[in-house]
Each structure stands twice: as structure tokens, then as C-alpha cells.
Amino acid sequence: MGKSDKKRILLKIGSNTLTKETNHISRGKIEDIGRQIFELRDNYEFIIVSSGAIAAAKQFVSLESNGKEINVKQALAAIGQPHLMRIFQEIFRELGLLTSQCLLTYHDFEREKSKQNIISTINILVENNYIPIINENDTVATEEIQFGDNDKLAALTASLLDVDLVVFASNTYGIYTKKSIENSKNITIREVIDLSQLKNEVSNVKSSHGSGGMQSKIDAATILQKNNIETWFVNGLEDNFILNAMKNKIEFTKIK
């Protein structure tokens, strides 16, 4: 049992997109994502890598830290992950879409047996029309092995699963030229073939909710390019951002 004839898209959703840059998960945004997946279902199959567990928890609790920041994040992730999944499940179910949860750690990509397990499990889910929603298993991951946002997790997962396209949804219209950022004009780099040229364009601006910046996205794109996977950086705050990118209705960065 392998891949179907459908093109396989891995959609990586950052915390900024899921919260629409507020302090809580946006049900409207999850519905927007679900509607697009539903519309594309005849030609595309989707795998989702979703951040947002910590953002989901912050709606309900604030925790005492005992000075251990990483443990608070892990505890928040443990509280928020079921909430995040419940929201996905409820909204996707209303659209007739089925969801499943996969929690992965860095180590899973280092062992051949666990890599094969990931491939088999996710392929079976997708073949049975269950959309895998993947997140880092934050409760067991420690600082040294954290993915640094889920950008790298998305790249490793896509490389393993023979994905055709990875769409990174964040809060910018792709990658901007450094000069345009300095001049507050934000001009999108539309197409990139040579990634080494991009490295000079990267500014060190990190996003407000997510833990990744542009650097982690470029590191991810480097992994994907080595595996011949096309990468798009799209503004997920826009409604219909996947459909609009496909029709070239919005500016975004495409890495061939």
C-alpha cells in the first residue's frame, strides 16, 4: 500500500496563524483550513503539522514556574494539546473531515524502525481519509531536542512521507527582501532556486507566538530542497490562503 494518485500536501500551521495573532486559538481559522482541504479533497491529500498546544492552554491556565521555563512549556503543552485536537476534531467533523493525532519526537527520525512505523501508520490513516495532525511530543522532548517551532519537524516528516508540496502558513506574505524590511515596505521574494542567496536576505525577526523565525524556515526549506520537495511560504492569516496561492492570487514565496 503506497501513495494514491492524489498529490500529497503537508501543511504546517504556525501558532501565529492558528491564533490569528491573538491570545487564543481561532476556531474561524481552523474552519478556513478545513473548508479548503474539503474543497481540494478530490485531487490532494493532506497531512497537517500543527503548533498551538501551548497557545491553546494559555486560554485556560497560567502556571507557576518554579524557575523552570521549559517545564512550564511542557506542562502547558500537555494541557493544551487535547484542547487543540478537540477543536480540530469538532470543526473538521462538521465539514465531513476525519482527524487523527500523531505526536512525534526528534528521536523518531533517527531510528530506522520508528521511521518505518511513522510511514506505515500515516499512510494507513491517509488511505482511510483520516487527516493526520502532527505535533511535537512536547511533554517528553527536552530543550536540546526540541524542533524550534515545528518547521524542522514538518521538513523531516515531509521528507519521510514522499510529500509533493509543503505549505508553511505563517503571518507574512512569504519571505521578504531584507532591504524592503529595513525600509518597512515588505517586498516578497516570489521564487527561489538557490537557497544560499536567501540566507543573505534573512532578518532575525522572530514571530510573536511561534518559536521559529525565518531562519528555522530556511533550514526547513534546505532539508526539503535536498529531497526534491517544493516549498511555499504563505500568509496563513488570509482566508483561503492555500486556494489563493494555487491561483496566484496572493504574494507568497515559492522554493523550487
Image: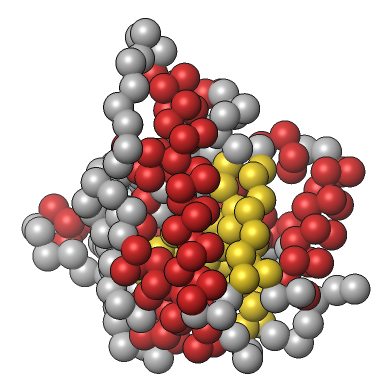
Instruction: Reply above or below: 6 against 233.
Output: below
Q: Residue at x 42, y 85 (%)?
A: 243
Tell me how the rendering is colored.
secondary structure
The image quadrant that residue 174 belongs to is bottom left
Q: Position of residue 239 (x, y in %)?
A: 30, 77
Residue 120 position, x and y percent, is 84, 59
Q: Please tell me in which quadrant of the rendered image residue 132 appears.
A: bottom right
Q: Position of residue 53 (x, y in %)?
A: 45, 43
Q: Is residue 60 left or right of residue 224?
A: left
Residue 38 x %, y % = 52, 83
User: Seen in the image, is 220 located left or right of residue 239?
Assistant: right
Residue 215, placed above or below residue 255: above
Q: Quadrant of the C terminus?
A: bottom right
Task: Please tell me which residue is depicted at 37% across the width and 8% down the height of the picture.
Answer: 66
Instruction: Determine whether, in the image, residue 172 is placed left or right of residue 164.
Output: left
Q: Is residue 43 above or below residue 156?
A: below
